[in-house]
């Protein structure tokens, strides 16, 4: 044990030492050359969208590349007061879980929908690590439209990786836990009672809707990262795992004992057959499935109560373990689908496995034994080869279209380019500092677009103007069009980016929605014109059917509301022009503002706490008379007999 602790301590010291011996300039590119390559002239567009997970901010942010300009923040698992996400009555249900309303999560990975293994620009999926969930973002609207909770799960880290034709996204447990139906067990019974699960979530090819197809039960290992196969390996999924020791305390030491952990190979096609033919066990669970209806402009929660669980100890020949050195993290499949790259965080080599060799080893029953009743393939039988002395602390690998792999090294703070077939290192560049994930446009698909690799760094130190104890997170853009990688640009990012996708803008930009057609608006409280604006009392609930159009709200004078009432401001934006949102806010509301897109209806709930006059107004600068876009709500005492009254314009306007 002492040895291991020493190894961990040395790694930490190396990290500290490495910052000090880095040079800081652009690697190999002259400043003018670099500037020219990232310059996007005013009024012109970037070539790629870069979708970047936000880590602990629970959001996805969207940048243009090569400029690094921030275009949009998409709230996913975290409330977003800027537009009312998670605060408005319509969006609150998206954050509902079996634990109630969970307004935050830790979002690590994203996955773009694929057709024939290529990016198709339709949806982006994202994972929630803390309270296990997966989300779908519609790339027509850049909005989160669906979130599904994952039962029998803890720490949903190896998620939401996707199959070649978007048949499934996955959700694998980083923290093994007892299944939901046996929650109260002693922690010391970890090996017996704690399980890993991999959920396969089916995607409807027409509308993207998610459906929990089945779960695969695994021993209590920590599933880390994952990739689907491609081409010849398309029916398989690969998961890295650590803690094959199945430790439940001081994992820093106890989960670093074994020389090899595993890559878990799951034949999802065969698992699907088992599930469809009734070979799984149906387990009672309870989880939230939240869907946003774009016509009703509203999310609702559906409670799901069953899941099919497949046990590979009973159902044979669909799960195998491949030994992989020292706590693998990244588990990446090259564009051909033949090579599977394991990145042992504490390993001195990068092992590259061969899918065809794996198939042969399975056919020949070339096993070195079993792990918890599941066959373990022989390392040498499956190995294509090892990249020798690649660097320190390999984490993730992306690919270009020319047979090269790009691996991030956290400890030695660098990106290393190597040849997938020959396993030779051909180039390396420093990153500033301690790179985590990296991304090549299309670099996780069958058709990489190449051109750039982007580093998402964990530590920033001196790269930007200081901003107190917390510094901006940093991405770095490198040109990979030549033999040598060249650093072009630093750009600060928000949250703590983990994985990212870069997608040609042409796949998305022309499909972007500009408005919501008002005639299609089926919101139950819509007002499709000012003549439909009204205020209706139902007991202590007051529904304000309000409209917004440049530059007034209708109604803008409301009386007859009392302390104890719940006032629902259902605001419909009557505009049908691109880029004309209106906002709505009222003094003292315990929520946030709402931003209402053209043709949309959104609702702010206001519970007045005192008698008085409450101003409300438009928060989005919509016209020269934006500042005039305001009104008043009169709130009277609980027993008052002030009649309900509302108006816009006359009779108050002086003649
Ligand atoms: Cu509408 Cu400002």
Image (cartoon, rainbow, N blue to C red):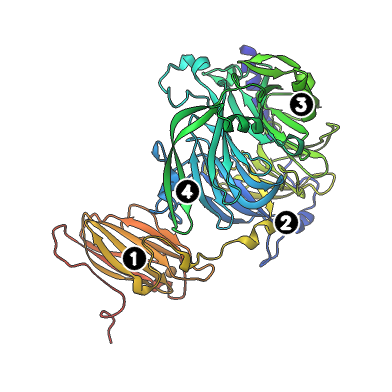
Quarter of the image where one finds residue 40: bottom right
Give the structural element (helix, strand or loop) at label 3. helix
Relative to 5, say whether 514 is above or below. below
- Residue 556 is tagged as none
Residue where numbered disc 4 is placed: 291
Determine if residue 55 is in view. Answer: no
As drawn, the label of residue 38 is: 2
Q: CA distance from mark 3 to mark 1?
A: 63 Å
Label 1 – label 4 distance at C-alpha: 24 Å
Other residues around mark 4 within 10 Å, as few (<14) / some (14–19) / many (≥20)? many
Instruction: Residue 567: name its quadrant.
Output: bottom left
Camera-side residue of 235 and 510: 235
Q: Which mark is residue 545?
A: 1
Mark 2 secondary-structure assignment? helix
Which comes before the other along the chain, label 3 or label 4? 4
Q: Is residue 634 above or below residue 152?
A: below
First along the sequence among labels 2 and 1: 2
Q: CA distance from mark 3 to mark 4?
A: 40 Å
Query: Badge 3: how crowded within 10 Å, few (<14), some, or many (20+)?
Result: few
Q: Secondary structure at mark 4?
A: strand
Q: Residue at x 79, y 47 (%)?
A: 480
Kind of element beneath mark 1: strand
Precedes in sequence: disc 3 or disc 1: 3
Q: Nearer the viewer, mark 2 or mark 1?
A: 1
The foreground one among 231 and 62 is 231
- Please state which of residues 276 and 259 is positioned toward the viewer in this rendering: 276
Q: Is mark 2 within 8 Å of ligand 1?
A: no
| In the image: residue 398, left or right of residue 560 | right
* Residue position for label 3: 359
Q: Residues within 10 Å of mark 1 (few under 14, many from 20)?
A: many
Q: Nearer the viewer, mark 3 or mark 1?
A: 3
Can you give x and y, in whole percent of width and height, for residue 515 in the image? 52, 65
């Amino acid at each position: 044990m002492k040895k291991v602790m020493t190894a961990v301590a040395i790694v930490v010291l190396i990290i500290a030492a490495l910052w000090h011996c880095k040079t800081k300039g652009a690697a190999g590119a002259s400043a003018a050359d670099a500037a020219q390559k990232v310059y996007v002239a005013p009024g012109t567009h970037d070539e790629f969208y870069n979708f970047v997970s936000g880590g602990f901010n629970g959001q996805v942010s969207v940048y243009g590349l090569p400029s690094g300009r921030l275009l949009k923040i998409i709230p996913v698992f975290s409330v977003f007061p800027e537009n009312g996400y998670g605060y408005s009555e319509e969006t609150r249900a998206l954050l509902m879980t079996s634990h109630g309303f969970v307004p935050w999560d830790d979002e690590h990975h994203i996955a773009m929908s694929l057709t024939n293994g290529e990016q198709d620009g339709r949806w982006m999926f994202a994972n929630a690590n803390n309270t296990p969930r997966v989300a779908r973002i519609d790339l027509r609207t850049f909005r989160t439209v669906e979130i599904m909770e994952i039962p029998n799960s803890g720490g949903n880290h190896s998620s939401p990786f996707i199959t070649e034709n978007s048949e499934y996204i996955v959700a694998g447990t980083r923290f093994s836990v007892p299944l939901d139906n046996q929650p109260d067990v002693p922690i010391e019974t970890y090996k017996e009672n704690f399980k890993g699960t991999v959920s396969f979530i089916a995607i409807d090819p027409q509308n993207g809707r998610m459906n929990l197809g089945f779960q695969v039960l695994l021993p209590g290992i920590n599933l880390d990262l994952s990739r689907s196969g491609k081409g010849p390996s398309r029916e398989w999924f690969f998961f890295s795992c650590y803690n094959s020791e199945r430790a439940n305390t001081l994992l820093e030491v106890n989960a670093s004992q074994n020389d090899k952990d595993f890559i878990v190979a799951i034949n999802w096609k065969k698992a699907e057959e088992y599930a469809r033919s009734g070979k799984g066990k149906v387990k009672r669970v309870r989880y939230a499935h939240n869907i946003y209806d774009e016509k009703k402009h509203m999310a609702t929660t559906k409670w799901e109560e069953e899941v099919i669980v497949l046990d590979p100890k009973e159902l044979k020949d669909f799960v195998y373990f491949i030994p992989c050195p020292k706590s693998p993290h990244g588990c990446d499949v090259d564009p051909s689908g033949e090579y599977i790259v394991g990145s042992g965080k504490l390993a001195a080599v990068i092992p590259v496995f061969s899918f065809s060799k794996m198939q042969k080893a399975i056919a020949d029953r070339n096993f070195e034994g079993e792990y918890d009743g599941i066959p373990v393939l022989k390392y040498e039988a499956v190995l294509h080869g090892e990249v020798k002395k690649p660097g320190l602390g390999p984490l993730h690998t992306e690919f270009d279209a020319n047979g090269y792999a790009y691996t991030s090294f956290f400890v030695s703070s660098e990106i290393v380019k190597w040849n997938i077939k020959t396993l030779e290192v051909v180039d390396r560049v420093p990153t500033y500092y301690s790179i985590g994930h990296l991304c090549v446009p299309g670099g996780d698909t069958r058709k990489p677009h190449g051109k750039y690799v982007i580093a998402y760094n964990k530590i920033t130190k001196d790269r930007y103007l200081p901003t107190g104890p917390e510094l901006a997170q940093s991405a770095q853009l490198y040109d990979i069009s030549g033999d040598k990688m060249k650093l072009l640009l630093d750009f600060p990012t928000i949250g703590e980016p983990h994985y990212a996708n870069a997608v040609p803008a042409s796949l998305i930009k022309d499909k972007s929605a500009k408005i919501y057609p008002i005639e299609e608006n089926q919101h139950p409280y819509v007002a499709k014109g000012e003549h439909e604006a009204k205020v209706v009392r139902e007991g202590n609930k007051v529904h304000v059917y309000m409209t917004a159009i440049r530059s007034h709200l209708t109604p803008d004078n409301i009386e007859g509301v009392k302390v104890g009432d719940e006032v629902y401001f259902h605001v419909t934006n009557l505009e049908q022009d691109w880029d004309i949102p209106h906002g709505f806010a009222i003094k003292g509301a315990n929520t946030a503002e709402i931003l209402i897109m053209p043709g949309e209806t959104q609702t702010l709930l206001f519970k007045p706490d005192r008698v008085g006059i409450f101003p409300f107004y438009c928060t989005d600068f919509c016209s020269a008379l934006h500042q005039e876009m305001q009104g008043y709500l009169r709130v009277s005492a609980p027993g008052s007999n002030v009649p309900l009254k509302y108006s816009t314009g006359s009779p108050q306007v002086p003649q």
